[in-house]
Amino acid sequence: MSNLSKRSTVYFEPDIHQALKMRAATTHLSVSELVDEAVRLLMREDQEDLAAVSERANEPEISYEDLLNDLKSHGKI
C-alpha cells in the first residue's frame, strides 16, 4: 500500500467481517486491499452508469402511463 494512503475506520457486521478476513487470508491480501479494490470497482461501475446516462440524455422521454398504453396497444400486457 502506498505511503500516500489515508486511514479510515470501517464497521462491518461480524459475519461479513469474518468472511472478509477469510477471503483476505486465502488471497494473500490484506482486508484494506480488498476493501480498497471493492470501492474502486464500485466507482468504476458508477462511472459506467453515468456514461450510459449521458449517452442517452438526448433520447425522448416517455411517461409511465404512455409506456403502459404502448405496451397494451402492442399486446404486451
Image: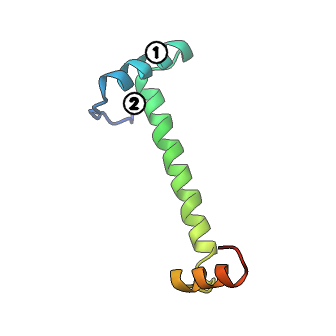
When asked about the image quadrant of residue 1, the answer is top left
Q: Which mark is residue 31?
A: none
Give the x, y percent position of residue 49: 56, 60
When asked about the image quadrant of residue 53, the answer is bottom right
Give the x, y percent position of residue 2: 44, 31
Mark 2: secondary structure: loop
Tell which of 20 and 5 is nearer to you: 20
Q: Is residue 27 above or below residue 61?
A: above
Q: In this view, does 27 lie to the left or right of 55?
A: left
Which residue is disc 1 drawn over? 22
Residue at left offset 54%, top offset 58%: 47
Give the x, y percent position of residue 63: 52, 84
Residue type, label 2: Asn
Tell which of 68 and 34 is nearer to you: 68
When asked about the image quadrant of residue 14, the answer is top left
Residue at left offset 49%, top offset 37%: 38
Which residue is disc 2 drawn over? 3
Label 1: few (<14), some (14–19) or many (≥20) C-alpha neighbours in 10 Å: few
